[in-house]
Image: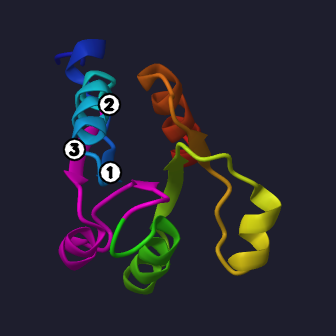
Amino acid sequence: MKEKSENSVKKRQYKILVIDDEPDINSVIKKGLNRNGFEVETFIDPLLALSNFKAGFYDLLLIDIKMPKMNGFELYREIKKKDNQIKVCFITALEFYYDGFRRVFPKLNVNCFARKPISIDEMANIIKEEIGD
């Protein structure tokens, strides 16, 4: 009877969807999170991300707040209609005020916010914490 070695047991790779209208930021996040063991898909257009979203496929969305065509909060609200179990973490370069967010979006159950600039290691830790890893 063969024993399983620790190396033969592969840890599940979490799937992250990143939506940020800046291609360079998407590229850096994707490469960094791939190095941290995540499987990452990116979109620069929130409407395209919404039309390609697959319910039950992703473990977490990483969404920029300020984007053209549709802001991150609007995108999240539309995605929640397709998958009400999806977890999200918003990223922003702007000063963020949680109380203001709650007044504008009282029904969105979101507690994960990351402020740019952020290191990839810190972002990976925030994602793991939000996923519950």
Q: Is residue 61 left or right of residue 28?
A: right
Q: Residue at x 33, y 43 (%)?
A: 14
- Residue 87 rendering spot, x and y as whole percentages: 50, 60
Residue marked by disc 2: 33
Q: Nearer the viewer, residue 60 or 71?
A: 71
The vertical placement of 63 against 119, above or below, is: below
Mark 2 or 1: in front is 1
Q: Label 1, label 3: how many angstroms apart (C-alpha)? A: 11 Å
The vertical placement of 36 against 103, above or below, is: above
Instruction: Give the number of the disc on residue 66.
Output: none
For residue 1, which quarter of the picture? top left
Residue marked by disc 1: 18
For residue 105, which quarter of the picture? bottom right
Query: Mark 1, residues whose alpha carbon is within 10 Å: few (<14), some, or many (≥20)?
Result: many
Residue marked by disc 3: 23
Q: Label 3, label 2: how many angstroms apart (C-alpha)? A: 15 Å
- Label 2 near label 3: C-beta < 8 Å? no
Is tag 2's residue or tag 1's residue first in the polypeptide sequence? 1
Residue bounds of the magenta highlight: 38-67
Q: Nearer the viewer, residue 95 or 1?
A: 95
- Residue 126 rendering spot, x and y as whole percentages: 56, 36
Give the residue type at disc 2: Leu
- Label 1 near label 2: C-beta < 8 Å? yes
SS state under label 2? helix
Give the residue type at disc 1: Val
